[in-house]
Image (cartoon, helix red, strand yellow):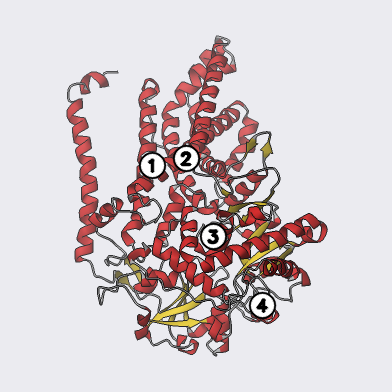
């Protein structure tokens, strides 16, 4: 409880320092990249037949300023040629939106499964192995299936769109850490607290909402962060897999096809993917601030 | 009570978020359909084998120019992707027609897919094996002892058949798996790389040659063309569901109309390559302007001039494709198919009707006088 008062005064300084460290990290990466490019052998570092460090040619490692500069040049799409960063931004927003839907669905499903498993021991024994097994199925195997099943769904005015398939695949990756983390969290209250509730004759639902859920927050937040990362990755991979138009995944493939003649452009959607990941992580950090009352003794996932 | 109200509010908020997102994204995820979806038109979906690009210029042109609509069809084009198998989509009932290469489909047919090649749009093969002049690979026999690239996944059969014909064993070369781009080739990791005339070959010509500071030119490259080597296999064809063709006469009629309008689209792309390239770019292709035009032009060369009218499946070419598919083993010793495909695997019945109607309407379906245009590629294809 005394943490707040101790760190109250130098907090502003600390924030500045953290920002400075963050920026230094990026600068370090740029310096390393350029240093290796300038000094490394053009044919890469090869041990035996195995290349362990990449070639330093402009084709394999464009200059950082070329990659950034390419963002502000036209994409060369002909029709309404916009600067590359505009295209990348649009694609990033699209991907972020789909990933967000996938994350929400994944979190809801993951929480429901965790509550079910917490409530019934039998459910835990029956469901948990399947949850773990589900993550061993390769994404590229289920992506086309989901698209095809989805396209056969139709009720009333509702038609299944391809982006929903991508969101489903993203949620398929996102629900896993949530269900595992939430289950641990829900089981985390001390026996003495649970027994106190029981001795007061408090029902299971009330125990869930007033004891177990608040206690699960320290376990849940890292799980949500993992879920957000998984949702973004799942979205990009599924976009590649089923060719959904508008997002970063497809842009990565389309630009990669031009990688030989325009190597710097290939990196533009990758920057976009990083930005999407950062926004997703930032959102979870915001969630953590909202839930800070419950964040006691947070454990790393 | 308190909790349940909160829960309902929460669920409501989620639903609103989902709806809002759906609203945002529906613009981006729409498929290409004709604007006028009037009730009189027959809805038709076509599954491509890759993203929208000039390889499919004829279909996009037919949509854009209203050729399908004229035949009473409302055509929706579904793009392909890395893990989409067009024939699976067709047999799954999610598309009415699909575009795919013949050797890739022959394997599916042997495994039980009931599909029919109803129009062989590409008469020639676009697959080549290219190498830098200094590697000295002027014939297939020269591949011996070289690193040879291939994409695999059914793109390797013409190469293997050509090597077999030239007496080069698989053990004589070092076979390298090739990526989407030509970086491996340009870096020298691959001495002879697989390249489609309409795509990867152009990618090389869009790249600066570090030795000269200018773009690479065709003079820098040696090309092994499988059409010349006699091991070409049939590529882009329109596939239909065999069972529906046999049982559903309306579907068979639609097939004829679809082929007819598609061929008209390809004739448009032949006569107006610049406009056709623009139509494809407008459909959402990310390829650069000069690359798109190059692709349109090269694809035209695979179609025109036509030996027996566009779309006709020539028996000799079909037999050659089947023979290679049966007799050429890959690096694991397996072949595409082990026995002759059934008679339903191709049919000229529908394309002949379509060609007859087109000839009556004065559309040139032979392209005897076809002359390709000259396309100047720019750096990066832009």
Whether label 2 touches label 4, CB < 8 Å:
no
Of the two numbered discs 1 and 3 in the rendering, the one whose residue sits closer to the viewer: 3
Say which residue label 1 marks: A276
Any mark on residue B50, and which?
Answer: 3
Q: Residues within 10 Å of mark 2 (few under 14, many from 20)?
A: many
Residue bearing mark 4: B308
The secondary structure type at the circle numbered 3 is loop
Q: CA distance from mark 1 to mark 2?
A: 9 Å
Q: Are marks 2 and 4 on the same chain?
A: no
A235 sits to left or right of B343: left
**Location of residue B365 by image quarter:** bottom right
Residue B26, numbered label = none
Q: Earlier in the sequence, mark 4 or mark 3?
A: 3
Q: Nearer the viewer, residue A90 or A39?
A: A90
Between disc 4 and disc 3, the foreground one is: 4
Task: Tell which tag, 1 or 4, sits nearer the viewer.
Answer: 4
Q: Are marks 1 and 3 on the same chain?
A: no
Report the residue marked by disc 2.
A99
Is disc 1 in contact with disc 2, using a CB cutoff of under 8 Å?
yes
Q: How many marks?
A: 4
């Amino acid at each position: 409880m005394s943490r707040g008062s101790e760190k109250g005064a130098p907090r502003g300084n600390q924030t500045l320092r953290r920002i400075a460290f963050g920026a230094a990290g990026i600068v370090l990466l740029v310096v390393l990249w350029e240093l290796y490019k300038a000094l490394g052998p053009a044919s890469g570092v090869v041990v035996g037949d195995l290349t362990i460090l990449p070639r330093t040619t402009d084709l394999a490692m464009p200059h950082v300023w070329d990659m950034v500069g390419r963002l502000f040049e036209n994409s060369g799409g002909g029709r309404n040629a916009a600067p590359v960063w505009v295209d990348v931004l649009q694609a990033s927003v699209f991907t972020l939106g789909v990933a967000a839907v996938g994350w929400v669905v994944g979190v809801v499903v993951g929480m429901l499964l965790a509550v079910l498993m917490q409530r019934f021991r039998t459910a835990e024994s029956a469901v948990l192995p399947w949850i773990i097994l589900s993550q061993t199925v390769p994404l590229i195997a289920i992506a086309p299936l989901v698209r095809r099943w989805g396209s056969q769904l139709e009720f009333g005015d509702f038609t299944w769109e391809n982006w929903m398939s991508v969101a489903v695949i993203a949620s398929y990756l996102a629900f896993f850490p949530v269900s595992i983390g939430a289950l641990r969290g829900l089981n985390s209250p001390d026996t003495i607290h649970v027994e106190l509730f029981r001795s007061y004759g408090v029902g299971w639902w009330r125990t869930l909402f007033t004891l177990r859920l608040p206690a699960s927050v320290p376990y849940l937040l890292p799980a949500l962060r993992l879920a957000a990362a998984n949702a973004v990755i799942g979205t990009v991979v599924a976009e590649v897999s089923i060719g959904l138009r508008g997002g970063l995944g497809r842009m990565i493939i389309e630009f990669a096809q031009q990688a030989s003649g325009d190597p710097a452009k290939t990196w533009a959607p990758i920057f976009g993917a990083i930005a999407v990941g950062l926004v997703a992580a930032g959102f979870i950090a915001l969630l953590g601030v909202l839930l800070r009352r419950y964040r006691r003794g947070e454990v790393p996932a | 009570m308190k909790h349940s109200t909160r829960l309902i509010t929460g669920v409501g908020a989620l639903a609103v978020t989902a709806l809002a997102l759906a609203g945002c994204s529906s613009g981006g995820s729409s498929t290409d359909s004709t604007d006028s979806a009037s009730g009189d038109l027959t809805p038709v979906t076509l599954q491509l084998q890759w993203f929208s690009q000039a390889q499919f210029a004829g279909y996009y042109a037919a949509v854009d120019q209203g050729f399908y609509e004229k035949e009473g069809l409302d055509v929706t084009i579904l793009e392909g992707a890395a893990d989409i198998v067009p024939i699976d989509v067709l047999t799954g009932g999610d598309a009415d027609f699909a575009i795919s290469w013949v050797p890739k489909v022959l394997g599916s047919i042997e495994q039980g897919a009931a599909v029919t090649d109803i129009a062989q749009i590409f008469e020639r093969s676009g697959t080549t094996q290219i190498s830098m002049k200094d590697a000295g690979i002027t014939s297939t026999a020269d591949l011996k002892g070289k690193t040879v690239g291939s994409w695999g996944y059914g793109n390797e059969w013409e190469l293997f058949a050509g090597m077999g014909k030239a007496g080069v064993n698989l053990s004589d070369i070092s076979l390298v798996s090739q990526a989407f781009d030509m970086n491996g080739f340009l870096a020298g990791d691959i001495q002879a790389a697989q390249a489609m005339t309409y795509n990867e070959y152009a990618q090389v010509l869009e790249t600066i040659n570090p030795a000269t500071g200018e773009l690479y030119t065709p003079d820098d490259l040696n090309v092994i063309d499988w059409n010349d080597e006699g091991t070409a296999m049939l590529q882009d064809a329109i596939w239909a569901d065999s069972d529906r063709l046999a049982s559903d006469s309306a579907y068979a009629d639609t097939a004829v109309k679809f082929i007819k309008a598609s061929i008209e689209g390809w004739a448009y792309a032949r006569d107006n390559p610049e406009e056709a390239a623009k139509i494809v770019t407008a459909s959402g292709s990310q390829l650069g302007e000069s690359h798109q035009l190059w692709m349109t032009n090269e694809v035209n060369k695979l179609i025109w001039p036509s030996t027996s009218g566009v779309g006709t499946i020539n028996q000799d070419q079909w037999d050659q494709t089947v023979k290679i598919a049966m007799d050429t083993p890959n690096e694991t010793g397996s072949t595409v198919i082990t026995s002759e495909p059934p008679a339903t695997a191709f049919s000229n019945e529908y394309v002949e009707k379509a060609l007859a109607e087109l000839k009556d309407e004065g559309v040139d379906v032979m392209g005897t006088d076809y002359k390709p245009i000259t396309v100047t590629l720019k750096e990066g294809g832009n």
